[in-house]
Image (cartoon, helix red, strand yellow):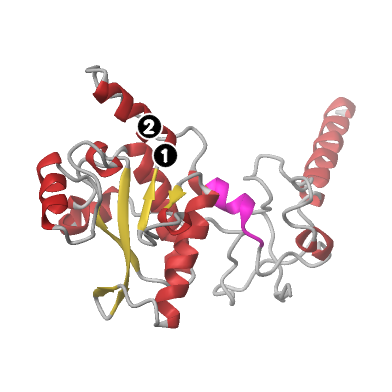
Amino acid sequence: MQPRIQYLSVLTTIVSVALAGCSTVNSPPSNPSPRPLGWTIPKAHGPVYRFFHPKQERVWKGVSPALREKVEAVLAQLAAEGFDIRVVEGYRSPERQAALLASASGVTSVGSWGSCHNYGLALDAGVFINGAPSWDLDDPHVLAGYMRFGELSEMVGLNWGGRWTSPKDYPHVELKSECGQAKLAYRQGRKLPLFAAPLEPATYLLARALPPSWCPRGSGWACAAWGTAKPLAWQWETPPRACLATLPNKLKKIT
């Protein structure tokens, strides 16, 4: 009996230490507000949603899985922040590329196989207002949407057209390095390379980069140092910089 009591005592101690790393605060309310951006990770739409929304799924046809994974994470975060941003064009056929160049519409300055769109490694997204895409940069909400889209896209490693000198292309993002490899393979007559989704989810890249809007009581110092501090000490079997075991009843605004 004595060894069993000692075993239970040691086990209790281990569990207590593990929980202590997540702070001793009470359970959160069922509907906390404001939404804890930075502590929870907005998820991209799953296969069930995609099945019942075929029109939205078609826009991804031909887009590299590596690009799609990153952009879907960005769009999920934007939706959580109140922006309705959707992909309007992904893969572009060489024939369409040639037609756009011939039209002299200013949409593109390169011909067939000269755009990252032709390899499924670039896409354009639009800020939607009342169900339609808007390109009105004089509208503060639209401009803020494109700026935030570019900011988050760069966080996950995408090249954003809004950084270009001329022309600036705010809706455009691409996998620059991968596109360069694909263009080189085309020029050399080799098989075009395929790029799989990265091992580390883009949602985790965003979770590490974005500061939380609130944090567990007693850990304000960690939130204040977000972005410069090393990952917090409570990472025992939890996503980076997030303690999922306990959350505060009273939310603390970080200003």
Is 182 placed left or right of 20 in the picture?
left
Give x and y (percent) for residue 178.
39, 32
> Which element carries disc 2, helix, strand or loop?
helix
In the image, is residue 29 part of the stretch drawn in magenta? no
Residue positioned 46% across, 46% down in the render = 158
Most foreground residue, 19 or 131: 131
Frontmost residue, 127 versus 187: 187
- Can residue 82 be seen at all in this image of the molecule? no
Q: In the image, what residue type sits under mark 1?
A: Lys
In which quadrant of the rendered image does the C terminus lie? bottom right
Q: Residues within 10 Å of mark 1 (few under 14, many from 20)?
A: some
Mark 2 and mark 1: Cα distance apart in space: 6 Å
Query: On the image, which quarter does residue 223 sit in?
Result: bottom right
* Other-residue count near label 2 (Cα within 10 Å), few / some / many at <14 / 14–19 / ≥20: few
State the predominant SS element of the stretch in magenta.
helix
**Marking on residue 176:** 1
Q: Which residue is mark 2?
A: 180
Q: Is residue 203 above or below residue 185?
A: below
| Number of marks | 2
Tell me: residue 162, above or below residue 195. below
The quadrant in which the N terminus is found is top right
Image quadrant in which you'd find residue 3 = top right
| Percent x, y of residue 20 | 82, 51
- Amino acid at pointer 2: Gly
Q: Which residues are magenta?
A: 204-211
Q: Nearer the viewer, residue 22 or 167?
A: 167
Badge 2 vs badge 1, beta-carbon distance below 8 Å: yes
Q: Position of residue 120 (x, y in %)?
A: 27, 40
Q: Give the left or right position of residue 86, taking residue 215 as reference.
A: left
Badge 1 element: helix
- Residue 213 horizontal side relative to residue 64, left or right: right
Q: Residue 96 appears at what percent x and percent y?
A: 12, 47
